[in-house]
Image (spheres, coloured by chain):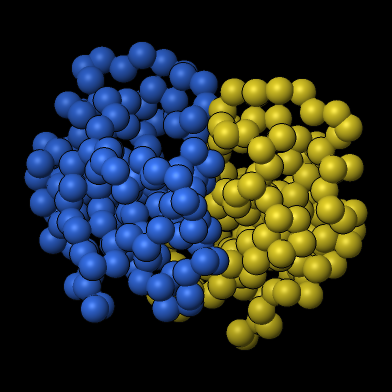
Chain colours: A blue, B yellow
Amino acid sequence: MSGGPCELCECPGGIVIADSPRWRVIRVDDANFPAFYRVVWNAHEAEFTDLDEASRAECMGVVAAVERVLRDRLHPTKINLAALGNMVPHVHWHVIARFDWDSHFPQPIWGNRQRDVAPAAAARLALPLDALDAAVRGALPAALD
Amino acid sequence: MSGGPCELCECPGGIVIADSPRWRVIRVDDANFPAFYRVVWNAHEAEFTDLDEASRAECMGVVAAVERVLRDRLHPTKINLAALGNMVPHVHWHVIARFDWDSHFPQPIWGNRQRDVAPAAAARLALPLDALDAAVRGALPAALD
């Protein structure tokens, strides 16, 4: 638990796709990586192992559901999953569809830019972002409590 | 499944801490991030959701066990977890103890270097790496098959 203000708690930081009692899913507003979702565990815990086993399983079930939609709808080159939290120590998972044409591939999104992308990345996805959001929303597991 | 040669399959890429029928744990040889372990799922699958639910749970159980040892023994500023695989599309998890004094903190290890570290990072850990390896080895779950 951190006592300071938490960026994730104060502001969604993107479009709220789903808001369940124990977790929420946000689409991050990132022009380079438009198919970038964040699964936030609502309880303000810093580390994955601060969650008990059932909570970790529930959290990873949400991550897997998002990953599956991104794979099925976008056929990305790779999915990237990460729980870092160096800046914001509140458990959240990045679920990012990566493409061999994207601005940083094969580098991590936090690495060095590899190329400029035109037309813009969002326009190159197989479906519009609002349709992708709806597919993600529809695939999320029911809340367990 | 990828047909090409796989770097993770051809070479351990570090010190093998444990080699179980379904997964293996390697300590990555990285001078900047000495407490950096990799959990490799032995089956040559590319994405986390290529694993069935039981396998995902088993894999994350290993990740959590490694994380817990790093937290207990090193009291890091933060743990970073990531499954990227852009270069090597074979499911593997990075489990990395991060410290506010490390070369890249609070940036991801793939981001920009923030500072030089002296004495070397390994010397600043609370215990020698071979003792840390032994603690990790001792904490891993028993193989399920």
* Image x and y of residue B27, in percent: 76, 53
Q: Residue at x 26, y 57 (%)?
A: A24
- Tell me, yes or no, if residue B13 can be seen here: no
- Tell me, yes or no, if residue A25 can be seen here: yes
* Image x and y of residue A20, in percent: 21, 64
Number of callouts: 0
Q: Residue at x 19, y 73 (%)?
A: A142
Choose between B17 and B126: the one closer to the eye.
B126
Q: Residue at x 88, y 62 (%)?
A: B131
Q: Residue at x 73, y 41 (%)?
A: B33
Choose between B83 and A71: the one closer to the eye.
B83
Choose between B80 and B91: the one closer to the eye.
B80
Choose between B138 and B101: the one closer to the eye.
B101
* Image x and y of residue B108, in percent: 56, 35
From what the image shows, is residue B100 above or below residue A94? above
From what the image shows, is residue B57 above or below residue A133? below
